[in-house]
Structure formats: structure tokens, C-alpha cells
Image (cartoon, rainbow, N blue to C red):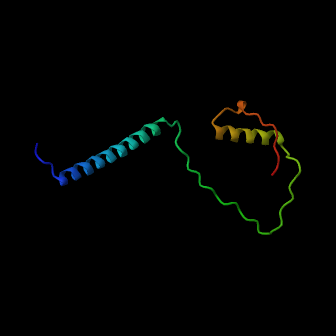
Amino acid sequence: MPEVSGVFVVCMGMGTVFVGLIAIILLIKLMSILIGMNKNEPEKTVIPTPAPVPATPTAAPVPSEIPNRAEFVAAVSAAIAEDLGTDVSKIQIISIKQI
């Protein structure tokens, strides 16, 4: 049997490694495409806007009761349902406290 040179063995080993790495990259890209196709809704980009700073350092008095409590609870329920991706009827709000 003829003698195999060391340079040939090194080149074959490095070639095998690079072919394997390229195959892994292609598999990862294929999986990300397949998983991306499974999403029902596109991602929404939300750009937060900074809150306006009051001109005076004094804070306005906070009312102790919410004037339209039923409307407020409905708005909070709708926001939570939208965030969770569920129906409003499946959400039960036990209490709302001001922080």
C-alpha cells in the first residue's frame, strides 16, 4: 500500500471540518426559515416615546377614586388580553391598585 503524505491528511482533515461547519450553518439557516414561517403574526416594532417632563417640580394631586371604573377595567382587560393573545372573557381581574 502506498504511503499517504502528511500534507494530504492535514488537508483532508481541515476540508472535512470546514464542510461540516458549512453544513451546520446551512441547517441553522434552514431551521430559522422553517420556524419563521410558523409565526402567525409579524413582529411589531414598538418605539417608546419619552414621557413629557413637567415644567414645575410639584406633582398634581391624584384623585383617590377612578371616575369611570368600569371603563378603566375594560381597557385594562383588553390590553392584557391583547398582550396574552387570548379572549377578554378568559381574563378575571380580582383587584386594581394604584402604585
- Is 5 left, or right, of 42 in this rendering? left
Q: Position of residue 84 (x, y in %)?
A: 65, 38
- Is 78 left, or right, of 38 in this rendering? right
Number of numbered discs visible in the structure rendering: 0
- Is 43 left, or right, of 88 in this rendering? left
Nearer to me, 67 or 81: 81
Residue most toward the top?
A: 89
Q: Quadrant of residue 27?
A: top left
Nearer to me, 63 or 1: 1
Residue most toward the right?
A: 64
Q: Position of residue 54 (x, y in %)?
A: 76, 65
Q: Position of residue 33 (x, y in %)?
A: 42, 40
What residue appears at the point 52 percent right and 36 percent down from the top-left corner? 40
Residue 43 vs 88, above or below: the answer is below
What residue appears at the point 31 percent right and 45 percent down from the top-left corner? 20
What residue appears at the point 56 percent right and 46 percent down from the top-left corner? 44
- Is 45 left, or right, of 82 in this rendering? left
What residue appears at the point 18 percent right and 51 percent down from the top-left corner? 8
Q: Quadrant of residue 71?
A: top right
Residue most toward the left?
A: 2
Quadrant location of the N terminus? top left
Q: Position of residue 3 (x, y in %)?
A: 13, 48
